């Protein structure tokens, strides 16, 4: 192999770094030649400058050691070389007969220090002495055994990942190092790392590849071993691959995008998750998202067997919008002619296959997912995208086209060797394998070294065995039948006969072979299994596992998988058009036997899909199951399932599965196999072992002491014990058959599981009845509000009625109620519209420019008058009102607040003498006289603008009175005087003449329109009764709500309250909170009662309405029909779509 080493240079680099163990002086100092103590000094050993004798490279005069080349680093103010190879010509001359050895070094930044690494092109890993590591560096266990150049073996202390920075280009690299004792080795960078960091460049086109090196002792095929392949093509087996081109995801625009919320991640997983996300970003697998995206998938984090997190996303909503393009798989008939002389086979597995497909820029934003650290998007094809198998197959096929003897089987690659003899076939195989590996290197395809099966004599291919002797039927697909244990009782025989009856339609004489076995099921027959039964059983199995009963696989026909789980085993059958293609079964492990029934059934689904992987991968599969909850759970989001089911759901994400419920009486094949199973525990590698590692208890944010208390209480709780038994045995399909005490759990039975003595709903522990009061007290220990307590509770615990119990507890908390915030606004209760002008007027005082004024406004016309008040006495106010009443007439009703001017004896006498009805609003509730409050606001604006502009304020009021009101076709002057008044603007004479206007209908319509907008975000508080305990909101800020008792109801929303501290107060309903109510969310009464009493407690619609507040609890359809929520949602707060976004 020819290697070219380039000196890496960087000009003008100013940043200083520390050098440890300087090669010139042996000390530590800044990386600068003038800082070196040896700079300019002469060596006492060789007489040369710039180094001390302790670091002199010259050999002793009589040394017998072999000469090597000197290795040095050149420093310069203008540039620095991190690679520099030098040699001693004198030494070369004196040692010319010996093999010349050149060592290459690279200076890399490790932290703040530059460390000199030796580049070893023959090393397959990176090595670093432990003394160069930070003391805080954490070492992981390693199984690697280092073989040195002299064939000696060295056991590393462990392994770790380090970040090296190239001083020249400041690029950062994360590499894995084997850590050894400080005296065992110098720091080494292997070939793969050196090439990735571009420290060396290998010209592969100049490499002469020898298929074999024949010696007298070793046959040729043994020269290229599995280890040699991994070493020579180390770059093919490491890193992340990427195929050429990008994939543009096509979606159906008619599908509404889905944005799933961010989910909670256990605290213990936060740091590992952050590290994993950063690692994926560094490897350019994902990227942070800053802009807004239409689609946001939910992130699912599962823990690998090594403790590290695996980042997955729930792509089910997105898959519904994807447009699929199917890629045809080769059939056995297509490749059979090419395999007639194949004698050697190698199977390769593509490492992280889907990540080889790069997503187009805009398409990558469709895969955005949310995390606790922000949003990210996949730059490569993520697992779970429904189109991923077809796209990956197409791109992989295009990348490997025209390679001889190569076939793609599902997601595996098959390389064959052909020849008349075994030796010729192996040579042919090695040639093709080398071409394939070179193509992988060229196309940046990465292979899984652990799954490389080299020079196999036979491999399985969609129900067949490819062997050196030709094509054979794969015995594995019928082994579940051939090795089925003999029936042990009558029920086992009945199950066997049921399966035979199902298959009899494909073989008319099949039933006749069962006559001997059928007699064992007769009531008068004593159980006895003898030779004639054994012979019939063996003959029956032979008939079932051959044609015409057994069918050959056809890629054109629909594919069905039938799977089932018993208490101790799993069974599965692969079928097309009802005829079996293959059978499979296995025993459950001791751990799996403790699974809930839903978990066993899902495990059967995972087992069947992976067992028949070559048949089911890359195509639509219908799965039949007699467990109805399985049909629903696969349609739910991943995050709603328990942890163990989440892992199983992730295992089948690469398959296109449609689960269909089939009654158990029609599931004869899978049911029989699940009860007469093979004794082995697993046939899918570490699938089940990985699923078994799930421990939901570790993900709960609850102390171990609390968990133990829940375990003990669960054992003593009769209801939860019944629930546990129901979960383990499986739920009935009908709710009426469920034990009455656990029917509350039926609606979410798919989410329930039992582990480690605790029952879970999803990831939340179900709390026994005896601990619920204590748990509620802990939840509210910090006196959070209702919503805060509910969010805290929903993180980790659950029980039926939990939401209402927490609300009630918070509502009764004395501390929270005394420091409560104000209540939300109630629905608008408008004044009754008068039928004529000046029938109802409102009045109020206001201050402007340090002067007091009285405003009087007509409720019908919205015409208002302003009067200056020299003082605020009642007599002055009465005098001003008399002037208006003398001009416009005496109104029927006068509305005011509770100011001393209006509650005095003089004003009461004035109302009696002038015969009008005086009504006052509740103290502190100015909205009850909203018409006057709105007029004050308008008047102040006009006065301030006139003063600022230096204009006459009376002209401003004149213009206002003659301007048509918003939503109406008339002005205040027209509605009061039946005509316009003359202004400075040209006005038609007809407008100045009296005209009777019928404005009442328009006023009512405008009032109703404003009320409908206002009431969207308001609701009524329930009516209080005499004797009800309440808390009164103080008018002073930062004070507590004071307790009292309702004395009587003065008006619809006005009450008289006897305070505990003494005294009687009159308050509006919004200032009173029930002492035993529902806290922030009091009971809603949909009916609205209009005011008819003498006290005003109404709110006037203004032109500008606020649109803030809480949503109504009672949901209605657009037509007004009341929506009754299902029982299963009683523990949730429901929102309308628009209200949710407020």
Image: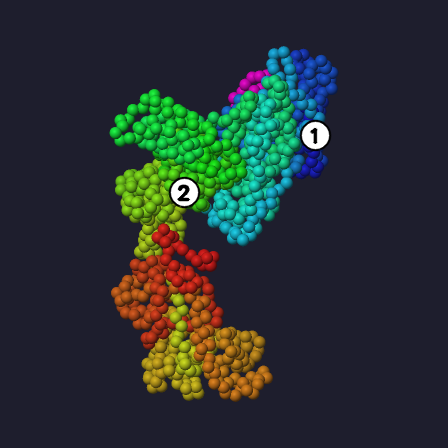
Q: CA distance from mark 1 to mark 2?
A: 66 Å
N-term mark: 1 or 2:
1
Residue located at (34% from left, 50% from top): 802
On the picture, is 663 further left or further right than 402? left
State which region is magenta.
146-158
Q: Which mark is residue 661?
A: 2
On the picture, is 884 further left or further right than 952? left
Q: Which mark is residue 6?
A: 1
Residue located at (38% from left, 27% from top): 513
Question: What SS does tag 1 mark?
Answer: loop
Vertical placement of residue 953 versus 5, above or below: below
Residue 342 appears in the figure: yes
Question: What SS does tag 2 mark?
Answer: strand
State yes or no: discs 1 and 2 in contact (Cβ < 8 Å). Answer: no
Within 10 angstroms of label 2, few (less than 14), some, or many (20 or more) residues? some
Residue 18 appears in the figure: no
For the stretch drawn in magenta, the main secondary structure is loop
Residue located at (63% from left, 35% from top): 399
């Amino acid at each position: 192999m020819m290697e070219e080493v380039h000196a890496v240079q960087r000009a003008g680099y100013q940043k200083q770094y520390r050098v440890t163990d300087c090669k010139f002086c042996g000390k530590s100092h800044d990386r600068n030649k003038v800082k070196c103590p040896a700079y300019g000094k002469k060596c006492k050993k060789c007489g040369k400058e710039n180094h001390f004798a302790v670091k002199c490279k010259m050999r002793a005069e009589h040394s017998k050691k072999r000469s090597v080349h000197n290795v040095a680093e050149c420093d310069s103010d203008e540039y620095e070389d991190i690679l520099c190879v030098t040699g001693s010509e004198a030494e070369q001359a004196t040692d010319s007969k010996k093999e010349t050895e050149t060592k290459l070094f690279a200076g890399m930044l490790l932290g703040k220090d530059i460390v000199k690494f030796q580049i070893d092109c023959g090393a397959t890993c990176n090595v670093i002495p432990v003394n160069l590591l930070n003391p805080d560096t954490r070492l992981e266990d390693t199984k690697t055994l280092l073989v040195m150049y002299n064939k000696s073996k060295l056991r590393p202390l462990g392994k770790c990942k380090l970040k090296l920075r190239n001083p020249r280009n400041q690029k950062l690299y994360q590499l894995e190092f084997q850590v050894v004792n400080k005296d065992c080795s110098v720091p080494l960078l292997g070939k793969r790392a050196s090439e990735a960091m571009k420290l060396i460049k290998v010209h592969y086109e100049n490499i002469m590849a020898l298929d074999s090196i024949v010696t007298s002792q070793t046959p040729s095929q043994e020269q290229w071993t599995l280890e040699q392949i991994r070493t020579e093509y180390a770059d093919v087996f490491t890193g992340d691959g990427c195929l050429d081109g990008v994939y543009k995801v096509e979606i159906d625009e008619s599908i509404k995008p889905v944005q799933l919320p961010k989910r909670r991640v256990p605290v213990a997983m936060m740091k590992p998750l952050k590290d994993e996300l950063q690692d994926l970003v560094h490897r350019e697998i994902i990227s942070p998202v800053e802009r807004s995206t239409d689609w946001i998938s939910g992130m699912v984090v599962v823990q690998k067997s090594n403790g590290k997190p695996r980042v997955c996303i729930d792509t089910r909503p997105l898959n519904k919008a994807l447009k699929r393009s199917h890629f045809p798989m080769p059939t056995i008939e297509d490749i059979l002619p090419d395999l007639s002389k194949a004698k050697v086979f190698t199977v390769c597995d593509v490492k992280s296959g889907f990540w080889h497909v790069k997503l187009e820029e805009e398409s990558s934003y469709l895969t955005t997912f949310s995390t606790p650290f922000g949003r990210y998007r996949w730059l490569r094809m993520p697992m779970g995208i429904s189109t991923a198998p077809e796209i990956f197959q197409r791109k992989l096929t295009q990348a490997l086209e025209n390679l001889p003897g190569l076939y793609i089987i599902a997601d595996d690659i098959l390389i064959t060797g052909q020849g008349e003899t075994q030796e010729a076939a192996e040579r042919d195989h090695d040639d093709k394998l080398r071409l394939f590996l070179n193509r992988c290197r060229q196309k940046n395809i990465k292979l899984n070294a652990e799954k490389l099966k080299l020079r196999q004599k036979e491999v399985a291919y969609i129900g067949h065995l490819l062997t050196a002797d030709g094509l054979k039927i794969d015995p594995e697909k019928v082994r579940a039948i051939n090795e089925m244990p003999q029936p042990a009782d009558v029920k086992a025989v009945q199950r066997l006969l049921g399966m035979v009856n199902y298959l009899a339609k494909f073989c008319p004489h099949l039933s006749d072979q069962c006559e001997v076995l059928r007699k064992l099921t007769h009531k008068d027959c004593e159980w006895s299994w003898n030779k004639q039964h054994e012979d019939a059983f063996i003959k029956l199995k032979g008939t079932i596992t051959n044609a015409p009963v057994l069918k050959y696989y056809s890629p054109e026909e629909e594919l069905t998988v039938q799977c089932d789980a018993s208490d101790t085993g799993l069974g599965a059958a692969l079928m097309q058009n009802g005829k079996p293609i293959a059978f499979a079964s296995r025993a459950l492990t001791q751990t799996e036997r403790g699974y809930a029934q839903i978990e066993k059934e899902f495990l059967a689904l995972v087992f069947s899909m992976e067992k028949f992987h070559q048949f089911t991968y890359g195509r639509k599969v219908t799965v039949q199951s007699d467990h109805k909850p399985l049909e629903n759970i696969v349609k739910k989001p991943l995050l709603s399932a328990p942890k163990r089911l989440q892992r199983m759901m992730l295992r089948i994400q690469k398959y296109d599965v449609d689960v269909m419920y089939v009654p158990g009486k029609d599931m004869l094949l899978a049911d029989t196999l699940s009860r007469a199973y093979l004794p082995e525990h697993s046939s899918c590698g570490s699938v089940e072992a990985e699923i078994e590692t799930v421990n939901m208890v570790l993900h709960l944010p609850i102390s171990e002491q609390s968990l133990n208390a829940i375990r003990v209480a669960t054992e003593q709780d009769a209801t939860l014990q019944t629930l546990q038994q129901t979960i383990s045995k499986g739920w009935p399909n009908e709710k009426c058959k469920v034990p009455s005490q656990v029917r509350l759990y039926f609606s979410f039975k798919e989410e329930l599981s039992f582990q480690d003595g605790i029952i879970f709903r999803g990831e939340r522990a179900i709390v026994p009845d005896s601990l619920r009061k204590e748990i509620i007290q802990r939840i509210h220990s910090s006196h959070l509000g209702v919503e805060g307590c509910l969010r805290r509770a929903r993180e980790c615990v659950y029980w039926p009625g939990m939401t209402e119990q927490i609300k009630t507890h918070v509502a009764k908390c004395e501390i929270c109620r005394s420091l409560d915030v104000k209540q939300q606004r109630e629905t608008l209760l408008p004044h009754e519209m008068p039928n004529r002008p000046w029938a109802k007027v409102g009045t109020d005082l206001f201050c402007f420019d340090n002067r007091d004024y009285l405003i009087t406004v007509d409720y019908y016309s919205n015409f208002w008058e302003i009067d200056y008040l020299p003082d605020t006495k009642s007599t002055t106010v009465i005098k001003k009102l008399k002037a208006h009443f003398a001009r416009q007439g005496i109104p029927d009703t006068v509305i005011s607040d509770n100011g001393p001017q209006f509650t005095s004896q003089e004003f009461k006498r004035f109302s009696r003498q002038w015969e009008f009805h005086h009504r006052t609003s509740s103290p502190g509730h100015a909205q009850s006289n909203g018409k006057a409050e709105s007029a004050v606001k308008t008047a102040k604006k006009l006065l301030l603008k006139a003063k600022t502009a230096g204009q006459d304020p009376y002209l401003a009021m004149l213009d206002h009175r003659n301007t048509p009101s918003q939503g109406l076709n008339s002005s205040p002057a027209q509605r009061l005087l039946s005509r316009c008044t003359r202004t400075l603007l040209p006005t038609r004479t007809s407008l100045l003449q009296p005209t009777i206007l019928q404005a009442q209908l328009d006023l009512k319509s405008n009032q109703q329109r404003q009320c409908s907008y206002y009431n969207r975000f308001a609701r009524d508080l329930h009516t209080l009764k005499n004797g009800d305990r309440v808390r009164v909101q103080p008018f002073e800020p930062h004070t507590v709500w004071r307790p009292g008792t309702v004395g009587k109801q003065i008006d619809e929303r006005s009450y008289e309250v006897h305070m505990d501290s003494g005294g009687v107060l009159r308050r509006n309903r919004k200032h009173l909170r029930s002492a035993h109510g529902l806290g922030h969310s009091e009971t809603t009464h949909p009916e609205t009662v209009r005011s008819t009493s003498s006290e005003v407690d109404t709110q006037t619609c203004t032109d500008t309405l606020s649109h803030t507040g809480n949503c109504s609890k009672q949901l209605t359809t657009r037509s007004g029909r009341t929506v009754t929520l299902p029982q299963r949602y009683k523990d949730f707060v429901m929102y309308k779509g628009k209200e949710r976004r407020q």
